[in-house]
Image (cartoon, helix red, strand yellow):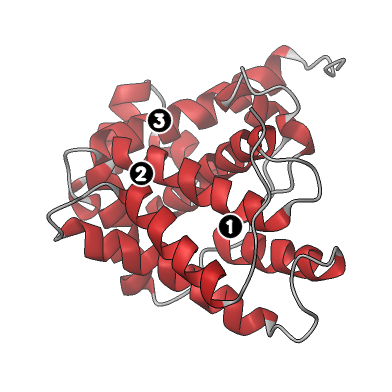
Amino acid sequence: MVHKEYSLRERKHAKTKIAIMNAFIKRLEKTRFDDISVRQICEDVDVSEGTFFNYFPEKIDIINYYMHLEFLQVIWKARKDVPEGAYVALIDAVLENLGKELLRYDNIIYQLIALMIIQQQRPKNLSISNLERQTFLPDCEGIEDIKLMLPDDFFSECLKEAVRHGELSKDIKIDDLQVSLMTILSGTLLAAKFAANKDIVYHFRRQLRFLWKGLGIKRAARRR
């Protein structure tokens, strides 16, 4: 794939935005969200507070940006493992890959959950440029072609395609099944936190197996 040539100014803009996000997320690994100051992040990245707010008007905007980019990467990885048109298997692969990512950022994910509950609203939909995607995920060839979504929209879209391709019955209520998948995602994260076995990937697999078996759904094999 031939990439577009970007100006020095465009590349600097993308690199600075990603650097601010990375600095914030690094601090979030060991520090509470409310205890991270804009001044600290500006010192880490060597930018002014005015520059910071040009990129992110509020601190919570960094979290939203990070969530979109991370989920973009998760979808990209999952699509490599699943045959085209196998949407139930794609849901499985996305949750499995997401679980692997979450295991690496234990403190961050639970802070993200708490923040969403406090905000009492769904994260805003974003537009992320191809250059920003390439800057954050330089090794993900074709990342520009992945539709930017959060889990609820992704599940809904996959379920609709699964019905259209005959993987799911037309009698299936998409909205109900979407809620079931979101319950597996959020509920498993909280349950695993206090379980003897804290392996999120293991629990995701088990819960998905129970869900699909209960619906009489057979899953497509993964690519090898």
Q: Which residue is mark 2?
A: 102
Closest to the observer, 61 or 98:
98
The nearer-to-camera label among 3 and 2 is 2
Q: Are marks 3 and 2 in contact (CB under 8 Å)?
A: no
Q: Earlier in the sequence, mark 3 or mark 2?
A: 3
Q: Earlier in the sequence, mark 3 or mark 1?
A: 3
SS label for mark 3: helix
Residue 217: x and y in percent read: 64, 68
SS label for mark 1: loop
Is disc 1 surrounded by few (<14), some (14 to 19) or many (20+) residues within 10 Å? many
195 sits left or right of 81 in the view:
left
User: Which amino acid type is shown beneath numbered disc 1?
Assistant: Leu
The image shows residue 141, relative to residue 123, as above or below, that is above
The structure residue drawn at horizontal position 56% and vertical position 46%, both measured from the top left corner, is 93
196 sits left or right of 183 in the view:
left
Residue 154: x and y in percent read: 65, 59
The structure residue drawn at horizontal position 68% and vertical position 39%, both measured from the top left corner, is 79
- Residue 60 circle label: none
The nearer-to-camera label among 3 and 1 is 1
- Residue 150 circle label: 1
User: Which amino acid type is shown beneath numbered disc 2?
Assistant: Leu
Picture quarter with the C terminus: top right
Closest to the observer, 5 or 29:
29
Q: Which residue is mark 3?
A: 22
